[in-house]
Amino acid sequence: MKLLSEREGLARLKKLKENFRKIIRESYEYRAKNCLTCEHQGICCLDDHFVNVHITELEANLILKEVEKLSSEKIETLKKRNLQTVAKYNLSEGNSNQTFACPFLEKGKGCLIHEVKPLACIQHACYERKEHLPPDSLQEEYERKIERLNRQVYGKPAKWLPLPVWIKILTEIGCEKSKITKT
Ligand code: SF4
Ligand code: SF4
């Protein structure tokens, strides 16, 4: 398997998510309820009996790159909120079935990582008829592509973990790296 630099992997991942979004938008979403006019906007992201979004390391890195575009104040708030989510729901590698309220939902603004959000979030919408939902096989196909990209970049099988767990892990690694550069 051809190995890729993380930079190239991130670029391919972004493109892959755009393709997935295009398919969902053009072939399925037009039959779903419009989130922009939803009277309960964001409730789906904050429902801690429902949200259980898992991502891989490469996706977590892409999300952190998106987060870096925010103000430093917002980044700090988000990091804190992410840590609080991990603690509140006791999220971990060994407790990955636990549901949680997503820390990336900002009331009044929506998803702060909309451009790079996980496949499950791109695919999610409220449909009146079950037969209008995108098939699970579509998301599974794209998950396999993401797993392949992870292997090409990191040289090992992808690990799917709850979104806040991967963000916590990479944020801590980032802090350690910056400590090393400062010393
Ligand atoms: S997915 Fe459903 S509940 Fe969530 S914002 Fe859209 S319409 Fe509203
Ligand atoms: S990543 Fe965004 S869309 Fe997905 S659950 Fe969190 S706030 Fe909602």
Image: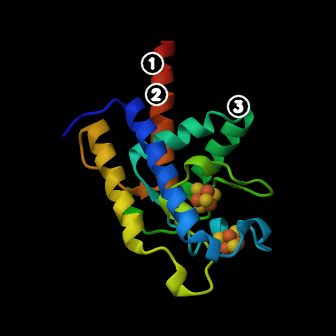
Q: Is mark 3 within 8 Å of ligand 2?
A: no
For marks 1 and 3, give the one nearer the viewer: 3
Q: Are marks 1 and 2 in contact (CB under 8 Å)?
A: yes
Name the residue beneath numbered marker 1.
180
Residues at circles 1 and 3 in contact by the CB criterion of under 8 Å:
no
Query: What is the quadrant of the N terminus in the image?
Result: top left
- What residue does disc 2 label? 176
x then y, percent, for residue 57: 40, 45
Give residue 163's position: percent from left, percent from top.
50, 54
How far is disc 1 from disc 2 in space, using C-alphas? 6 Å
Residue mark closest to the camera, 2 vs 3 = 3
Number of marks: 3
Q: Which residue is mark 3?
A: 72
168 w.r.t. 180: above or below: below
Q: Position of residue 166 (x, y in %)?
A: 45, 48
Q: Are marks 2 and 3 in contact (CB under 8 Å)?
A: no
Secondary structure beneath disc 2? helix
Q: 103 or 23: which is nearer to us?
A: 23
Q: Disc 2 or 3, which lies upstream in sequence?
A: 3
Examine the rendering and report whether any part of residue 166 can be seen: yes
Mark 3 residue element: helix
Q: In the rendered image, which quarter is residue 111 located in?
A: bottom right
The disc, 1 or 3, on the residue closer to the chain's N-terminal end is: 3
